[in-house]
């Protein structure tokens, strides 16, 4: 199923989707899939992307531009940037008047705490149904890597769990992986997919109704984040695959992304855990070339 065209009447509330998940789970890929489907269906989607680091790589990967895409940097939308999120959502409503809102959190943000912002004025007046989707990297889950703290907090607050990157694990492992997620979050539905390709109607059901947000917002205990640090490095043109691998094989590195110039030309570099992937291609902004953002435990 694909997103159907939307007919909104004045005063209709706008549904919102929070896409969360640990570093490298595939959040941006899922959002890109949704944007492509929306474009084909003529659905106006506004995106707020919360990225660790300051290169704007997610903006480049999404191919988003104009007033319908806003990037928030320097913290998490679930806490430090919550006021910025409210201001941004209100601005998008006034300037873009979207049919759908997508908030892509950073890899360390908590989705439930992010959705609590939808109960705040003035956005509580016009945001309708909301869903917190948590994307899980099947390979990370199989390896048992970084499954405590932030990962558990994210999974346990999901409305829907997307077990992504199933092409990186054996099909015989999927049941055990779902059982592992069930041990953390026993109630949220689980859908398995490759490359973030989730049926759009599951994330934006066609029978959405406007949620009444009168009364007090749900509450959650105060939270604290694990400590992560971001670094930005420059990479000389013509780097070999062996030298790139050596550069990005370091203890504590959780995620790296950016564009470099390899021996045969520009490459998009994506590092998740021990996996290093390179894809030929130019960045949309030449200023991004030769620069990588690294995310490590502090």
Image (cartoon, helix red, strand yellow):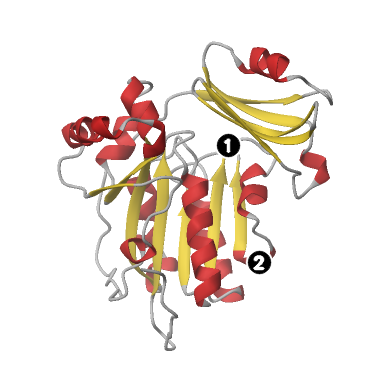
| Residue, disc 2 | 67
Helix, strand or loop status at disc 1? loop
Helix, strand or loop status at disc 2? helix
- Identify which residue is drawn at 47% across, 33% down: 23
Residue 293 vs 19, above or below: the answer is above
Relative horizontal placement of residue 152, taking residue 81 as reference (left or right): left
Res. 44 visible in picture: no
Give the number of marks: 2
Q: Nearer the viewer, residue 246 or 234?
A: 246
Which x, y percent locates residue 151? 35, 31
Which x, y percent locates residue 283? 74, 45
Q: Nearer the viewer, residue 59 or 10?
A: 59
Residue 270 vs 196, above or below: the answer is above
First of labels 1, 2 by sequence position:
1
- Identify which residue is drawn at 34% across, 66% down: 201
Res. 94 visible in picture: yes
Residue sticking out furthest to the bottom:
9
| Residue, disc 1 | 52
Relative horizontal placement of residue 180, taking residue 199 as reference (left or right): left
- Identify which residue is drawn at 20% across, 35% down: 175
Relative horizontal placement of residue 183, taking residue 232 as reference (left or right): left
């Amino acid at each position: 199923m694909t997103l159907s065209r939307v007919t909104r009447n004045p005063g209709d509330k706008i549904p919102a989707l929070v896409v969360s998940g640990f570093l490298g789970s595939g959040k941006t890929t899922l959002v890109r899939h949704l944007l492509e489907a929306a474009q084909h269906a003529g659905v106006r989607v506004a995106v707020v992307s919360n990225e660790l680091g300051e290169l704007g790589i997610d903006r480049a990967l999404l191919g988003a531009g104009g007033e319908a895409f806003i990037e928030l940097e320097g913290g998490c939308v679930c806490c430090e940037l919550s006021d910025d999120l409210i201001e941004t959502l209100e601005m998008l409503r006034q300037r873009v008047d979207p049919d759908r809102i997508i908030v892509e959190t950073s890899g360390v943000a908590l989705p439930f705490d992010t959705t609590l912002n939808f109960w705040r004025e003035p956005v509580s007046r016009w945001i309708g149904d909301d869903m917190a989707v948590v994307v899980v990297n099947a390979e990370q889950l199989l390896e048992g890597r970084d499954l405590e703290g932030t990962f558990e907090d994210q999974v346990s607050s999901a409305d829907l769990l997307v077990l992504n990157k199933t092409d990186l694990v054996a099909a015989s492992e999927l049941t055990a992986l779902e059982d592992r997620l069930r041990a953390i979050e026993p109630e949220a539905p689980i859908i398995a997919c490759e490359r973030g390709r989730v049926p759009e109607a599951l994330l934006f059901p066609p029978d959405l109704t406007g949620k009444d947000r009168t009364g007090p917002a749900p509450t959650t205990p105060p939270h604290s984040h694990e400590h992560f640090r971001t670094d930005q490095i420059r990479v000389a043109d013509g780097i070999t695959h062996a030298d790139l691998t050596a550069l990005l094989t370091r203890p504590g590195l959780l995620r790296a992304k950016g564009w470099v110039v390899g021996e045969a030309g520009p490459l998009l570099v994506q590092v998740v855990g021990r996996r290093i992937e390179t894809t030929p291609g130019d960045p949309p902004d030449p200023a991004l070339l030769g620069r990588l953002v690294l995310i490590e435990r502090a």
